[in-house]
Amino acid sequence: MKKFLKFAYMILCLMFIGTFTVACGGGGGGDSASGGGFGYFPAGANGNGGNGTINPISPDAEYSFDNTKEASVSFTDGKTEKNTPTISSLESTLSVEMPDSWEITDTKNVEGLTKGNYRLINNWLYTTNDSGSASEKLTFNLPVNSGERRTEKVKIKSGDKTYTLTIIQAGFKEDPEKRGNISADKTLFEVDSLSSTNIDTSQAINSPTNFNSRKEKVKITAPNFQGELKVLGGQVLDVSGAVAVDNYRVVDLTIYENPLGYREVKIRIFANTDYIDITVKQKGAFAVGEGTEDNPFIISNLDDLNKLSKVGFLSAFGNIMLADKNFKINSDISGITSPIRLPYGHNVGNAVNTASKICTIDGNGKKLTANINVTDGNASLFTYGSGIIKNLTVAGKITATGNNAYACGIFDNSNLVGENKISNCTNEAEVTATGDYASAYGISPSNAVTNLKNIVTNCTNKGKITATYRACGIGGSTISDCTNEADVTTTGEYDSHASGITDSYNGTITNCTNKGKITASGNSYPYAGGISANTNEGSVISNCTNEGNVTSSHYAGGIVGDSYRSTIKSCQHKSGIIKGEVNEDYNYSGYIAGNASDESGLKISGCKYKKATGSTATKGVGNYEDSESGCTNDETI
C-alpha cells in the first residue's frame, strides 16, 4: 500500500511541472536525441540547426543561448534543469512561445527609436511587444554588447503566476580560451587627413558629395568559417565587400577624410565567434591642437580658415560630432573672399533646428580682413552653424545683394533657430545690403524677423552700415555693454528701420551707447532710433545713452523711434539733433521716444534728455499725451 501511495504521489507531481524546449540555429545537423548542440548561425549562412533541450519552467530560471543570433523558446510541461550558455555579443534576437495570456511587468517606452514600436527593459534589452496571448511570441532584441558580459532579469506575468526570465549576453571584452581562427594580412593603416578645402558652395545643403575618401583592401582568413563577416565600425569608416575567395574574404575598407585633428579608430571584424581588430591612425587637417577648451585647434592662415569652413560644411550633413570643437586664431589674416561656415550643432533635417552643440571661435585679439561680395544671398564673415565667437576684430568690406538678403560684419545665422554668443568683438568693415527688403548689421542679425537667440556682449561697431530695409550697428536678441560709433543709414521707400544698436526689437538692451549718425529715409513710415528703431511688446531698454543725430521722415527718437508696450528706464539723450515728421496734428519726434503706439502700455522712468538746436523734438516723447511722463529735461548731462 505504501509503494502504491508513493507511486501515485509521483504521478500527481509530474502533472504540475513543465519543461522548456529550445531550438537554436547552427551547430551540428542532428536533433537533441542524436546530440545536436548549440551553434552559431550567422545571417546568410546555410545549414540545418540542431535542437537542444534545457527544460526549465519555474518562477526563477535562466534562459540563454551560446553564440547564436536567433533562438526560439516554447512552454511545455516538464521539470527544471539548469543550462546557462550565453547569447552572442553581436546583435541578436530571441523569440519565446508564450502560454495563455501574458504581460511583461517592467518595460518602459523608448524615445528616439525608429525601428518598430520598441519597449526598453531596464537598461539595454528591447522587446517589440510586452503583452499578448499564447499565439503571440515574445521577441527580445539584444543590441551589440561591446563591454563586459551583462545580465538582465525580466518579470513575466501569466495568470496568477509571475516568472523571472534571466537573459545573459556575452561581451567583446570576454575572450574565449581559444582564439586564432581569424587573421588579417594587415591590421594597421596610417593615412593622412585626405582633407581638401575646396568647397562647392552652390551645392544643395542635403547633398553630401564633398566627402573625400580612400579605399584599402584587407584580406581576412578564417578557415572554418561559413557565412558573412560581421563588422563593427564607426562614422569615419565603412566596410563592405567581404568577397569569398577560397578560405579567405577580401574586405573593402573606406576611410573618410579627417577635417579635424589626429584620430585613431578601431573596427572589429567577426568570423563565427572569433574577431580581429583593424586600427586606422589618421592625421588631421589641423596639425596643432585637439579641439578642446584647454588645447584648441590653431588657425594660423587663410588655408586654416578654409578648413574650418569645410568642417562646417561637413557638419551640415549630420556630423554633429564636429560641432563642439574649440578653435583659436593666432595671427592676423587677410584675403578672405567668402563666408566661413561654422559647424552645425544639430541635423539639418530637424524641424526644430535647436543647437545642442556649438563650437567656439577665440579670435585671440587678432584681426580678420575680408572683401566678401555675395550676389543673390547673405554675406558675413561667419555664417550658418552655431557658435561662441569672442575676442575678434573684422575689417574690410562685406556686401550682400538680392531680395531679402542679409549682410553682417561678424556672424549671420538668420537661416537657423539656435542660441549663439558673441562677445568682445569689433566690426570695422563697411557692411552693405542692397535689394528689396535687404538688411545690414554690424555684428549679427536682430531677432526682428528671425527666431534666433544671439546674445551679444561688449561689442563695438566702427564700420558704416547701409541697407535698403533695416540697418543697425550691433544687432542680436539680448544685448549689453555695446557701442555703435558709425553712421547707419537705410535708403528704402517702405518701412525702413535705422538704429545704432538694433532695429525692430523683442528682447533686452542694457548699458549700450550710440555715437553714430542714424538716418532712415523713405516716404512710407521710416523709423529711426539712437538705440532701437522700434520696440515690441515686452521689450526692455535700460541704462542706455544716445550721443548722435537721429533723422527720419516719420518716427525719430533719441532712444527709440516708436515704442509699443515696452519699458524704457534710466536712459538719456546726451547730445545730437533729433528730427522727425511734424504736421499740424502730430510731432513724431522725441528726445527719448518719437512715438508711443499704445500709450497705455508704455512705461518710461528715470530718463533724462538734453535739448539740441535744430531738432524737431521738443519733449521726452513725441506723439504722446503725457509727453514728459518719466522724462526730465536736464541740460547738465
Image (cartoon, helix red, strand yellow):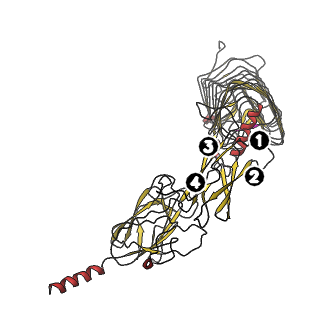
Q: Residue 207 carries which label?
A: 2
Left or right, residue 336 beside residue 242: right
Q: How far apart are marks 4 and 1 (CA)?
A: 32 Å
User: Viewer-nearest of labels 1 and 2?
Assistant: 1
Decide which of 70, 519 is in the foreground and name it.
70
Residue at the image position 59 percent from the left and 63 percent from the top: 223
Q: How crowded is the residue under tag 1: few (<14 C-alpha within 10 Å), some, or many (20+)?
A: some
**Residue with the most extreme top position:** 636
Under circle 4, the secondary element is: strand
Magenta span: helix, strand or loop, mainly? loop
Q: Mark 3 points at which residue?
A: 264
Residue 525 is at least partly visible in this image? no
Q: What element carries label 2?
A: loop
First along the sequence among labels 3 and 2: 2
Contact (Cβ within 8 Å) of mark 4 with mark 1: no
Which residue is tagged 4? 276
Q: Nearer the viewer, residue 282 or 359?
A: 282
In front: label 3 or label 2? 3
**From the viewer's perspective, is 157 left or right of 568?**
left
Q: Say what amino acid the circle numbered 1 marks.
A: Ser
Is residue 346 rendered magenta in the image? yes
Question: For the residues marked 2 and 4, what is the alpha-carbon distance in whole angstroms?
Answer: 35 Å
Q: Label 2 neighbourhood size at 10 Å, few (<14), some (14-19), many (20+)?
A: few
Q: Which of the labelled discs sits on residue 196, or is there none?
A: 1
Please report the bounds of the magenta region as a residue range: 339-347
Amino acid at pointer 4 = Ile
Above or below, 172 against 530 in this view is: below
Amino acid of disc 3: Glu
Label 4 crowd (10 A; few <14 / some 14-19 / many >=20): some
